[in-house]
Amino acid sequence: MTTITEYMTGVHRHCDEILAELEVAVSEDDWDKAARLSADFLQAMEHHLTMEETVLFPAFEQKTGMIGGPTMIMREEHRQMRELFQQLQWALDGKASGEFLDTTETLLILMQQHNIKEEGILYPMSDQHLGTDAPQVLARMQKV
């Protein structure tokens, strides 16, 4: 059976792969491909963030009673990422490759730090604390 940690780590890798392809398309001035990949990336990221915010975080908080801890930090980082998503879209719309690549560099650093915390702390804590409820929580996440 797949754990929350395993599943969400896979989601992280998928988003990272799309972002890497997107950076290549922009650096090659392939704006049509970049537009498609950007839509795919933003959709995958929003889906990922929504799974966490609407299912995983509330389940974790309810089970542990921790509402000011790791999930609060993750929500703030999600907000920061969404701001960078807007900047990416503006740069893409303006075909401003330098601005786009600078923003992806910032976003990548934020995502890497965020993923380390989720994969190393939050997801394992979720698997542990949710215990026998973890498969049901994961199933609800997958339906988002």
Image: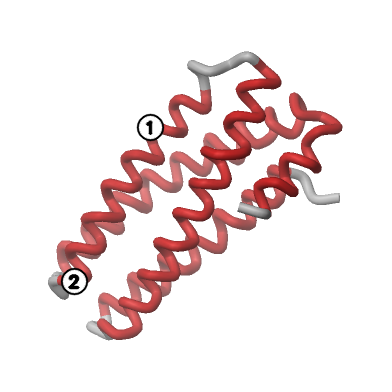
Q: Quadrant of residue 73?
A: top left
Q: Quadrant of residue 128?
A: top right
Q: Is residue 13 above or below residue 18?
A: above
Q: Is residue 18 above or below residue 54?
A: below
Callout 2: SS? helix
x and y percent of residue 7 in the render?
69, 52
Q: Nearer the viewer, residue 136 or 4?
A: 136
Residue that badge 2 annotates: 93
Residue at the spot x=76%, y=29% of the render? 130
Residue at the spot x=34%, y=76% of the render? 24
Disc 1 from disc 2: Cα separation: 26 Å
Residue that badge 1 annotates: 76
Q: Nearer the viewer, residue 139 or 1?
A: 139
What residue type is disc 1 on?
A: Glu
x and y percent of residue 59 in the render?
66, 30
x and y percent of residue 42 in the render?
40, 61
Question: Are the residues at dot 1 and dot 2 in contact (C-beta closer than 8 Å)?
Answer: no
Q: Is residue 133 left or right of residue 17?
A: right
Residue at the spot x=67%, y=53% of the render? 142
What residue type is disc 2 on?
A: Asp
